[in-house]
């Protein structure tokens, strides 16, 4: 099965051989795809191979398919009433205390049937390829009981098999302490350690384990205990860290050599340096900061200067960031964190792929890699964040198959 994409105006890609932020740009080229993999990039004037199906890119721009390394797509009820409370000045913590927040999502999730949740989740994740995303990490975390967390992870695994977007499952049973354990935190941590994590591991329902390490949620010591249990059961680690207060989450992620530490709005300089040393990928979620009406954004420049390779993600979830539009996140990343387009290309493709241990097959445009590509109706890379709030995708290609066309 051959596919030929001709008449590409500009192709941009990060490459492992280049330093973070330096990208390769090829003008006027074509890509040959065979059996779902990139077999060659042909610059203008080189003799072109005979091929089967042909796509005319019409002089548009081609990038690697985007990889969104932090999403919470498996939920039931939406929470627009809380959005209104936030407009009226209530904080995230105040909304949680008024019965909103994650525990609100949990109550609704437990009442809904698996098939119904799966259907709404399928509709939500179908939006990602529309914005050029070809792989997402997907977390559980709105069940918070053994039965409901398994339900959530089964939905992710089933949808991964049934539709073209690749989904990497993460177990986030430690998203919150559920209502019934509010006076028995120890009981919930034991449930995570002795029942949920062993079962998730045994049934191979997740590749990663995540913990919401934050004031009022799980302490650093509790998070360490849960994450070490996950490591013992063969799961790799991601950590919700230092979002709302400087809490030692970045340091914990470095200590445990987690794949990622995510949010990091309040990460300390020491934590940043330790993450750089340990090779932890900071996953930055400026859409969440924007949506929570906060003024202080994650110190992305300090992280890059310290030698971290950052990822940029939507944090798609029903409370604090309700968007699948990673292109919009580029604009927020640019304006609020001072990130440049070259850096954001790395942060939305190769580095999130590294964070998911998928960088051998996706995240850049190179011969031999899986043909995950997005064709954008933009004249150059700088234009993507500049013309904001709209969808620039012309076509999204996953393993050589067209999965979205404008
Ligand atoms: Zn999150």
Image: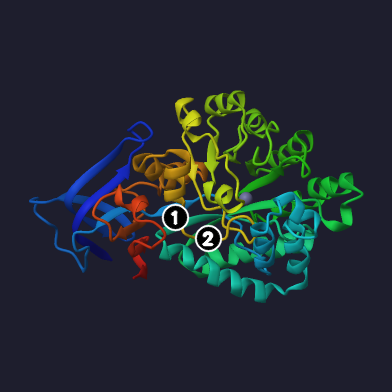
Residue 270 higher or lower than 18, as above or below: above
Q: Which residue is mark 2?
A: 323
The location of residue 187, given as percent across then percent down, is 89, 48
Q: Is residue 27 left or right of residue 331?
A: left
For label 2, the crowd category at 10 Å Cα-Cα, with few meaning under 14, some 14 to 19 and many 20 or more, is many
User: How many numbered marks does the figure carry?
Assistant: 2
Q: Is residue 279 left or right of residue 216?
A: left
Residue 51 picture quarter: bottom left
Asked whether the residues under the numbered discs 1 and 2 touch, taking CB atoms below 8 Å apart as contact, a structural biologist would say yes
Q: Residue at x 41, y 47 (%)?
A: 349
Residue 334 higher or lower than 137, as above or below: above
Of residues 221 and 114, the one nearer the viewer is 221
Point out the tag, 1 or 2, that comes first from the N-terminus.
2
SS category of the residue bearing label 2: loop
Of residues 346 and 33, the one nearer the viewer is 346
The location of residue 293, given as percent across then percent down, is 60, 50
Residue farthest toward the right in the current orientation of the protein: 183
Residue 85 picture quarter: bottom right
For label 1, the crowd category at 10 Å Cα-Cα, with few meaning under 14, some 14 to 19 and many 20 or more, is many
Q: Residue at x 63, y 66 (%)?
A: 155
Q: CA distance from mark 1 to mark 2?
A: 9 Å
The location of residue 282, given as percent across then percent down, is 54, 37
Q: Residue at x 34, y 51 (%)?
A: 386
The location of residue 41, given as percent across then percent down, is 21, 50
Whether residue 372 is visible, yes or no, is: yes
Q: Residue at x 40, y 48 (%)?
A: 361
Query: Which coloring applies here?
Result: rainbow
SS category of the residue bearing label 1: helix
Q: Is residue 146 left or right of residue 11?
A: right
Quadrant containing the C terminus is bottom left
Q: Which residue is mark 1?
A: 328
């Amino acid at each position: 099965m051959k596919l030929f994409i001709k008449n590409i105006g500009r192709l941009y890609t990060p490459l492992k051989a280049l330093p973070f932020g330096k990208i390769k740009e090829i003008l006027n080229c074509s890509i040959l795809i065979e059996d779902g993999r990139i077999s060659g990039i042909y610059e203008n004037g080189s003799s072109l191979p005979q091929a089967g199906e042909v796509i005319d890119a019409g002089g548009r721009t081609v990038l690697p398919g985007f990889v969104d390394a932090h999403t919470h797509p498996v939920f039931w009820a939406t929470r627009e009433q809380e959005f209104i409370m936030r407009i009226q000045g209530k904080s995230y913590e105040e909304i949680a205390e008024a019965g909103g927040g994650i525990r609100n999502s949990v109550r609704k999730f437990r009442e809904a049937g698996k098939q119904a949740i799966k259907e709404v989740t399928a509709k939500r994740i179908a939006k990602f390829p529309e914005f050029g995303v070809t792989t997402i990490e997907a977390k559980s975390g709105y069940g918070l009981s053994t039965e409901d967390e398994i339900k959530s992870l089964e939905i992710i695994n089933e949808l991964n098999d049934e539709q073209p977007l690749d989904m990497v499952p993460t177990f986030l049973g430690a998203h919150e302490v559920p209502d019934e354990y509010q006076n028995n935190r120890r009981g919930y941590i034991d449930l995570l350690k002795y029942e949920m994590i062993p079962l998730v591991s045994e049934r191979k329902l997740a590749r990663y384990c995540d913990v919401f390490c934050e004031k009022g949620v799980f302490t650093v010591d509790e998070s360490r205990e849960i994450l070490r249990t996950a490591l013992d059961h063969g799961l790799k680690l991601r950590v919700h860290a230092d979002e709302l207060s400087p809490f030692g989450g970045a340091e914990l992620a470095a200590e445990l050599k987690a794949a990622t530490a995510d949010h990091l709005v309040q990460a300390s300089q020491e934590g940043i340096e330790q993450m750089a040393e340990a090779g932890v990928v900071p996953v930055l979620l400026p859409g969440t900061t924007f949506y929570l009406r906060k003024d202080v954004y994650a110190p992305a420049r300090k992280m890059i200067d310290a030698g971290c390779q950052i990822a940029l993600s939507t944090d798609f979830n029903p409370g604090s960031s309700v968007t699948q539009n990673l292109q919009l996140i580029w604009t927020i990343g640019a304006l609020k964190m001072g990130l440049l387009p070259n850096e954001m290309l790395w942060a939305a493709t190769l580095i999130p792929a590294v964070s998911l241990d998928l960088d051998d097959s996706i995240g850049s445009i190179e011969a031999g890699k899986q043909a995950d590509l997005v064709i954008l109706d933009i004249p150059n890379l700088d234009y993507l964040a500049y013309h904001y709030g709209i969808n620039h995708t012309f076509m999204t290609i996953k393993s050589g198959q067209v999965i979205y066309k404008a």
